[in-house]
């Protein structure tokens, strides 16, 4: 798929297809995996960092393979999910930092254009998340910015 705001091509790659037999070397039980995920999340780590820790430190291929559920589903069932999705949080923090920069450097028109492109991405994501009930219909971007 092409990139959003450029004429460059996107990145493509294959995904590994996991099965139970491929990971016979894993000795952790599903209960241990769930407890590990919940303890890492309670430490304040984001979903992506929890997944990387499971892979790098614990040697687990992923929650989808071990539990049959995605990491976000496990966290939402235990009421440890995010109120705002992680990708949207990242875009909002990037928007805030560029806005701070533009406040100090008024002549930086490239940064101003980047800020507008980031806002377009944010609005597109908010529309998608509201449509698919990840965000409530009353959620407003003005509260966050």
Image (tube, rainbow, N blue to C red):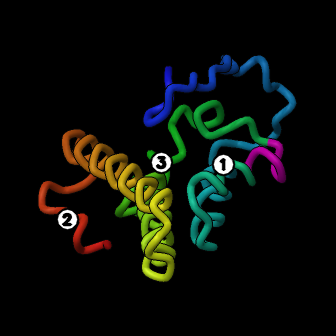
Label 3 vs 1, first from the N-terminus:
1
Image position of 32 (left or right of 42): right
Instruction: Determine the CA span between mark 3 and mark 1.
Output: 10 Å
Image position of 122 (left or right of 49): left
Residue 80: x %, y % from top left: 45, 63
Residue 33: in sight, yes or no?
Answer: yes
Labels 2, 1: front one: 2
- Residue 5 appears in which quarter of the rendering? top left
Label 2 belongs to which residue? 140
In depth, the one of 104 and 10 nearer the eye is: 104
Range drawn in magenta: 54-59
Label 1 belongs to which residue? 51
Extreme-right residue of the structure: 25
- Residue 92 appears in which quarter of the rendering? bottom left
Crowd class of label 1 (few under 14; some 14 to 19; many from 20; radius 10 Å): some
Label 3 belongs to which residue? 72
Label 2: state its secondary structure.
loop
Label 2 vs 1, first from the N-terminus:
1
Residue 116: x %, y % from top left: 36, 55
């Amino acid at each position: 798929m092409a990139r959003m705001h450029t004429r460059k091509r996107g990145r493509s790659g294959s995904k590994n297809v996991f099965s139970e037999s491929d990971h016979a070397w894993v000795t952790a039980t599903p209960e241990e995996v769930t407890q590990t995920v919940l303890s890492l999340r309670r430490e304040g780590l984001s979903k992506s960092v929890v997944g990387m820790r499971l892979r790098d430190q614990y040697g687990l291929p992923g929650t989808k393979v071990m539990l049959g559920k995605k990491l976000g589903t496990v966290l939402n069932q235990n009421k440890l999910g995010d109120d705002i999705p992680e990708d949207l949080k990242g875009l909002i923090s990037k928007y805030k930092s560029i806005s701070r920069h533009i406040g100090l450097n008024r002549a930086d028109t490239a940064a101003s254009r980047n800020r507008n492109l980031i806002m377009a991405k944010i609005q597109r994501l908010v529309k998608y998340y509201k449509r698919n009930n990840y965000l409530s219909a009353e959620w407003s971007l003005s509260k966050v910015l």
